[in-house]
Image: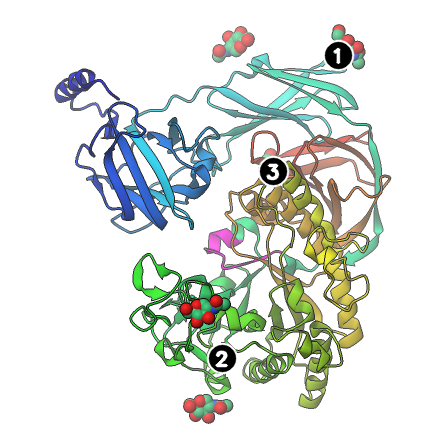
Amino acid sequence: MSSATLRAALVALLAVATVVKSDQDIYVDDALSNGWQNWGWNTVINWAATDLAVGTSSISAVSDAYAAVSLKSPETIGSYAGLKFDIAADPSQLQLYFQSTADDSQSSAIPISAISAAINPTSFTTVIVDFNALPPNGAPLGAGTWDRINFQALGNGASYHLDNIQLLTSIVVTPEFLSAEPIANNYIAVTTKGAVNFTSVAVKLNNATIAVNGQATYVPPDTPSRSITYLKLAKNLAPGTLSVSAGSLSVSYILPAVQEGSVLTGTKTPISPLIYGVNWPPSASYIQQLGVTVSRWGGNAVTAYNPFGDFTNAAADWFYENRNADAGNANTWIGWIKGAGSQAMMTIPALDWVAKDSTSYSYPKTIYPDQQKFDPYNADAGNGLFPNGSYVQPTTDPNRAYVPWNTTAARTWLSGLTNKPEFLFIDNEIEIAHGTHQDMHPAPMSYDEELSRVVQYAKVAKDALPNAKVAAPSTCSWWFYWTSAVGYTDNAAHGNVDFLPWFLAQMKAASTTAGKRLLDYLDIHYYFQPDLSANDDAAKALRLRMTRSLWDPTYVDESWVGTNVQNHQPNGAAVWLIPRMKQLISANYPGTKLSISEWSSTADGDITGGLVTADVLGIFGRYGVDVATYWANPDAKGPVGLAYWLYRGSGTYFGNTGVQVNLATSNAANTYGVYAATEGGKLSIVIVNKDTKPLGFHLANVPTGSYFLRHFGGAAGVAKWQTNITLTTSQYIVVPAYTALFIKKT
Ligand SMILES: *[C@@H]1O[C@H](CO)[C@@H](O)[C@H](O)[C@H]1NC(C)=O
Ligand SMILES: *[C@@H]1O[C@H](CO)[C@@H](O)[C@H](O)[C@H]1NC(C)=O
Ligand SMILES: *[C@@H]1O[C@H](CO)[C@@H](O)[C@H](O)[C@H]1NC(C)=O
Ligand SMILES: *[C@@H]1O[C@H](CO)[C@@H](O)[C@H](O)[C@H]1NC(C)=O
Ligand SMILES: *[C@@H]1O[C@H](CO)[C@@H](O)[C@H](O)[C@H]1NC(C)=O
């Protein structure tokens, strides 16, 4: 604001009407006001910048990676309705979050890009963040002793301007129809915000008005800012032009010709309940809300976990620094995970060192002054690389951050666990230890060394906890399924057999020698290889069709995998992941199960990532994956979390016995997936519409009657909720664009 006079008048007014709380200025021009302070870090700030300003001046800030402008209030701010500010920034380089000084808690981070699509680096955009509906998911800020507002740069650092920062006492939510979409047999799902008037809603199908017979409104507790109202139509939806008008919103849909399909409940295949897992669930309520069946203690830091002090080391992920283990003590973790109803997967370190304390690090500047990067929070801790990107020399002394670790230590630890994990993993991605853990294992891992480590630690695992299932080798990606970090000379030294088939055959032989099975699960990590970082329409469509790499032998991977075939496997340009792995198992070590303990949708915050997840969970069930855990713990209210909720939310589960779905249209897997299952005689169906237009199905052998319906996605962003519907014989099940729908017979 530029008018000093008006401000003076307001201040005068405030002085008299002290009981009425009013909007509070944090920054207008030149300096922070009302007792606010800057508690930011590693950021160069000009509080009176004139290069870009509304009024006389603005805040200009240049933050290093993960550094921030942190505005600290003299009192808590939770009773305000929201925050208003002007911002000029590259929205992809910055995020906003709230923090409490009293208990150090933090809100979830809000990407600046999710606040407004208009935000740009060259001019100011005025935005309001509603504390009752934080972007991107509409979740409330929630109760807390919030007193800090942090504008934080992401990994590349950021240069940005802020102006006219103000706390608002009220935000008028203009009643608005956000979307109105046909769904299921005879419903319109309307997403709204504010107090809308539904009397004006009119629905026409092929120019004939359809009466609305009933309506039910839900306010999802975790997104109270958006309500969803189901309008029950007097007649079924049908192919043709559907128009819906509601207030100022007027939308029309081409409902497509009916696609015939059928559900064959005679053809049954079991669906493993353990495919609905995640890494590091944050709480017991998360496990219950999303129906998480199995939880993994995984990732790069677990390699250095020292159970005799609960220390770990971040490895290449963060300047090789020791810290207290994020999840605390392993035994305690297993206890609460199992108490919440999930199975527990523990990882046994299998290199030669674990963290010695919570503070040491491997590459001090005092010893290696010439490094590429140093920790912005600890200027002495470097990343172990010369400025040109090669590893520093001489190699560091592992004793700097670590103490020795061996099978005796592992045996002592595992034997002492009072909470028993269902699964024991032999370390994590050790085939790339020379990169991730170059401070303790600089030499490239060979076939023989990896096998030897897995065999030794598997024996300890089986001795100490005979009921735990052993999983290995947790290979990071497609490239290393087939060769080692040593390179192709290593394949050549092993009869030119690719790594995983060789490993399986060797584990079979080692088990025979040991007189017991040493490997219960072949564990791999699977990350889709195409580069989708553009996240434009083409990248989204590719993301949605690349789930075919999990099962389809005719799908040549649309990445380097499809063009640079480095393996010696049949049909090597197709990933064809699940059937391929099952074939390798049956050829080399029959009876071994298949585990995928890390995978990712490639876009946790994007609706297409949620649809990929819903599709993948259906595929894992249909093609018989035995265990799978997502990397890492998707936001329960975001698109990926909602895919878990769709299949498993709050005690309503997709069936445990897969049944066949026949569709008249073949080759539709680029645009949709249809999965069906039964349990206790009740049919459940998931339909994932990956297309940008609605789908309409008639599915034979789907019993008529009452169904529970749940969905997420659609035109209003990531709207979601659930209701009860009735299916009749003449059903025409509509699934809106970019929506995943679940129905289950009640
Ligand atoms: C809702 O809209 C209808 C028709 O548009 C109008 O008659 C009615 O008064 C409105 N109701 C309210 C509560 O505003
Ligand atoms: C609906 O009405 C429009 C305009 O009156 C007309 O052009 C169109 O053909 C009608 N459509 C149908 C399916 O009757
Ligand atoms: C990188 O820099 C280091 C230290 O200056 C040097 O010893 C090394 O040869 C360089 N490596 C390459 C590939 O240039
Ligand atoms: C592990 O290290 C301890 C301590 O040095 C040693 O006593 C023990 O024999 C080692 N165990 C093995 C299997 O080498
Ligand atoms: C759906 O019906 C079931 C009973 O079959 C009931 O328990 C549940 O509350 C209903 N759900 C909704 C969202 O109406």
Amino acid type at image mark 1: Ala
First along the sequence among labels 1 and 3: 1
Residue 677 screen position, x and y as percent: 74, 50
Foreground pick, 311 / 215: 311
Foreground pick, 525 / 185: 525
Residue 207 screen position, x and y as percent: 75, 12
Specify whether 56 is left or right of 12: right
Return the residue at label 2. Answer: 414
Give the label, 2 or 3, closer to the camera.
Answer: 3
Q: Which mark is residue 208?
A: 1
Q: Quadrant of the C terminus?
A: top right
Is residue 346 depicted above or below 55 in this figure? below
Q: Is residue 550 magenta?
A: no
Q: Which residues are magenta?
A: 276-287
Return the residue at label 3. Answer: 536
Instruction: Residue 30: name its quadrant.
Output: top left
Is residue 641 depicted above or below 718 in this figure? below
Categorize mark 3 by other alpha carbons within 10 Å: few (<14), some (14-19), many (20+): few
Categorize mark 2 by other alpha carbons within 10 Å: few (<14), some (14-19), many (20+): many
Q: Residue at x 36, y 45 (%)?
A: 152
User: Quarter of the picture for ligand 4?
Assistant: bottom left
CA–CA distance in space, label 2 to label 3:
48 Å
